Image (tube, helix red, strand yellow):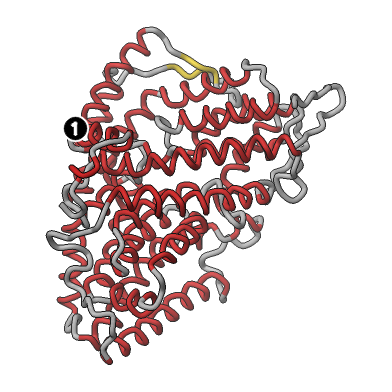
Amino acid sequence: MASADKSERRGGFLDAVERFGDRLPDPVFIFVWLIAILMGVSAVAAFLQFTAVNPITGETLMAQSLFSRDNVQRLLTSMPQTLTGFTPLGLTLVIMLGAGVAERSGLFSAALRAGLRNAPKAAMTPIVMLLALVAPHSSDAAYVVLSPLSGVIYASVGRHPIAGIAAAFAGVSGGFSANFMPGPIDALILGVTEPAVHIIDPTWSVNVAGNWYFILGMAMVFFPLGWFVTDKIIEPRLGTYVPTGETPLSSQKGDSQLTPQERKGLWLALAGFLGVTGLWLLLTFGPGQYLQIPGAPWDQRLNPMLDSLIAYFFLLFLICGVCFGIPTGTVKSHRDVVRMSTEAMKDMAGYIVLAFTAAHFVVMLNWTGLGAISAIHGAEAVQSAGLPAPLLLAVMVLLAAGLNLVVGSASAKWAFMAPFLVPMLMILGISPEMTTAAYRVGDSVTNIITPLMVYFPMVLAFARRWDPNFGMGGLLSNMLPYSGAFLIGGLALTIIWVWVGLPVGPGAPIGYEMPAGATPAIGG
C-alpha cells in the first residue's frame, strides 16, 4: 500500500463505491465485458429496428448489429488501425517519450524543488486547479501533460500525489465549461450550434465569445469547489502517502537544496524552453506562417498551432531534459536518452493493453449507431417536458450529464441534440448561446466518473505509477465528489443565471427574439 491503511476508513458512501469498484474486473476486462454486452444489445436493437431521424439531414438512423457481415469483417480486418487510431494512445505515448527524459534526468524534481521549496503546501491545490481550468485551451494535451505533472508537484512537497492527479483531472474536465477566456472548444461547440439555429433563423451567425461571461462565472464556481473537495475530502481519504516501491520521484534527489550542477542544468533547461517556444512562435507568426491558416477567420486561423501542441510538449520535455542532464551527469550520451524514453514506454505498457480494448469498444459503439440514436431520443424527451425556462435548462444539464456517461464526444453528442434543443428553446425565448452554455455544463461534469471517457484509463495508469494497487474503484470514488460538487454548482449557477437574466457573453443575451411570425414565451 502507498497510503494510509484502508481498514481505518471502511465506512461511508465513498468507501462503498471504492469497494464496489475494486471488486470489478481489471479495466481491460471491463471493456471486454462491455463489448460483449454491446454486441448483444446491438443485435436486439437491430432486430427491433431501433431508429431515430437525424434532424439536420433528415436521414433515418437505424441500429446496426455487430454480428452483421460488414461489422464482423471490419472488426477482424481493422484491428491494427483501431488501436493506432485511438487518439489518446498516440497523444500519450508521444508526450511520454519526451517527458520520460525530463523525469529521469532529474529535471522535474529539481525544477519543482527550486520553484516550490518555499511555497506552502496549502498553495498547491489552488495552483493546480487554476492551471487545470485554463489548460483545456491546449485541448487533449491538458489531460496528458497536467495530470501526471500534478502528481509530481504534490509528491515533491510531501502531499499525496494521487490527490494532485485527481485535482488536475477534475479541473481539466471542468475547464471545458468553466474557463477565463474563450478558446478552441468554444469555436467547436458553438460551431455545431450554428446549423441548428438555422433551422429557425438562417440569418444567425456564430459568436465564438458567446459563452464568455458564463464560462467565467463557472470558473469562479468550480475553482473553490475543486479546492475544497481536494483538501477536505479527497486527500484526507487517501491518507498519508507512503511509497513502497519505485515511483516517478524515487530515483530523484530528495534534498530540497540544489547542487551547483543542478542550478546550471536549470539555466540550460530554461534556455531550451526559450529555444523551443521561440521556434514555435517563429513557425506560427514568422515568415511563411507554417502553423497558421492564412486568410481563415480568427477563431480558426491558429488551429494548426493548437494541433501542434503535442509535438511542442514532446520536444520541450526532450530538449529541456537533455539540457538539464548534461551538466548534472544523468545524460552522458545519446544512449541515456534512448534508455530514458524506453523506460517511459515500459511504464505505459499496461495502458497500451487497456487502450486496445477501450479503442475497440468506442469504435464498435459508433458502428452500432446506438450512441447517436440514444442522444436524439434523449433530446426529444427534454423537448416534451414543458417546464419553465430555468428548470428546462436544468433538465438539459442533467440530460447531457447522463448521456455523457455513455457517449463521450462533446461535439458528436451536441450535433444530435442541438437540432432539437436549440430551436425548441429559441421558440421559448432562450438564446442559442444560453442553450449551448447549459449543455456544456452537463457535458463536463460527468467525464471524470465514467470509465468510457477515453482519458479515464490513462489517468488510472498515471495513478498506478504511484500506487500499483490503486484500482478502478479508487479512481471512481475519488472523482465522484468532484462530479457531484461541479454538478450541483453548475445547476445552481445555470438556474440563477437564467432567472436573473445575465448576458451569456458579449452580444449574447439569454433571451432570444424570434423572427416575425413567431411569438416566444420565456417561462420564469
Residue 144 horizontal side relative to residue 462, left or right: right
Name the image quarter holding residue 379.
top right
- Image spot of residue 184 (x, y percent): 56, 53
**Residue at 23% over, 23% down:** 36
User: Does any portion of residue 159 appear in the rendered image?
Assistant: yes
Name the image quarter holding residue 322.
bottom left
**Residue at 34% over, 34% down:** 362
The single residue placed furthest to the top in the displayed view is 48
Q: Say which amino acid is labelled 1.
A: Arg
**Residue at 23% over, 48% down:** 351
Of 276 and 244, which appears nearest the observer?
Answer: 244
The single residue placed furthest to the left in the displayed view is 245
Residue 197 horizontal side relative to residue 359, left or right: right
- Image spot of residue 78 (x, y percent): 26, 36
The single residue placed furthest to the bottom in the displayed view is 260
**SS for tag 1?**
helix
Check disc 1 and report the residue beneath it: 23
Q: Looking at the image, is 65 positioned above or below residue 262?
A: above
- Mark 1 burial class by Cα count in 10 Å: few <14, some 14-19, many 20+: few
User: Does any portion of residue 69 appear in the rendered image?
Assistant: no
**Residue at 33% over, 44% down:** 478
Q: Looking at the image, is 422 positioned above or below residue 445?
A: above
Of 54 and 463, which appears nearest the observer?
Answer: 463
Of 411 and 289, which appears nearest the observer?
Answer: 411
